[in-house]
Image: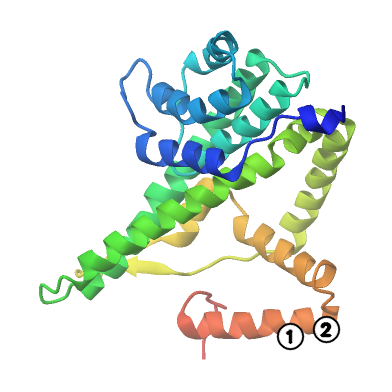
Amino acid sequence: MDATQNTKQLDRKTLSHSFHLWFWGALTCFSQEHMQTFGYMSSMLPIIRKLYPNHDDQVKAIHAYTAFFNTNPMLGSVIIGTTASMEEARANGKDIDGETINDMRAGLMGPIAGIGDSLIDGTLIPILLGISLGMSTGGSPVGAIFYIIAWVLIAYFGQRFLYFRGYKFGDQAVGFLVGKQGAAVRRAIGVVGGVLATWVNVTTSFTLRGVDGKVFLNLQSKLDSIYPGLLTVVVTLFCWWLMSKKRVSAIWTMVILVVVSFIGVLLGVFNPGLSY
């Protein structure tokens, strides 16, 4: 019999079921002792049932998800997707056990919580609220409706995207992080990061003000609290994507940057610091 016929693979329906359990129940049975443990466990139940038809195997596999877990619910969906990929690999005989899975999520939940809380709660939500308050002038309900719709769409499709990205690259990511290539790339990132920090500097002057005229959101300060130099990295990766993936010449890449900068200055996103 062909060995591929014995390979266990998660289908789209099972993965979607797992994602929706996390999306709706990440904070299930939330307590100071367990936090999101039961929400995590619930999201893994469809995965376990699909990969392990035998009840005893299911009990043994689900035991890995009884450990404490807590992270940002929105960005944390990438951990759930990565875990699904690792569980699939474990069911197919890969050298992955419950301890490996726990080590992975223990190492990721802290950094993702810090980034997620700053990016979502400290940046995205205040921006949406600022826009909504501006639309609610005079008691109009449009602002509230906009906020509800915008937040639900961003939360759902953002989490779904991260979940399936985590599943798609999870097994490869684990092998990459612990392998020789991962070590080489981490060293290269350090060198490239030093060069970027020295020669490239991209910042934004975008702010939101309240009705009293006081600034209640400084986007650059929020970005610096998440990842100093984040915009510099994003612009660099954008240029690399244009030239490497889209085959755009260096000259046209510079033209695009000039146009983006010009529009950004007009909209108040960038401040060139010029005075006339």
Disc 2 is placed on an element classified as helix
Identify the residue under disc 2. 251
Residue type at mark 1? Val
Mark 2 crowd level (few <14, some 14–19, many ≥20, 10 Å Cα): few
Say what amino acid the circle numbered 2 marks: Ile
Tag 1 near tag 2, CB within 8 Å = yes
Q: Is residue 153 visible?
A: yes
Q: Residue at x 63, y 36 (%)?
A: 10
- How has the structure been colored for display? rainbow
How far apart are the alpha carbons under marks 1 and 2?
Answer: 6 Å
| Relative vertical location of residue 96 with respect to residue 79 in this rendering, above or below | above
Q: Nearer the viewer, residue 210 or 272?
A: 210
Q: Quadrant of the N terminus?
A: top right
Q: Position of residue 204 (x, y in %)?
A: 53, 68
Q: Residue furthest front?
A: 1
What residue appears at the point 51 percent right and 18 percent down from the top-left corner? 65
Residue at label 1? 255
In this rendering, position of residue 174 left or right of residue 273: right
Q: Residue at x 21, y 72 (%)?
A: 142
Q: Is residue 170 left or right of residue 4?
A: left
Q: Is residue 244 above or below residue 161?
A: below
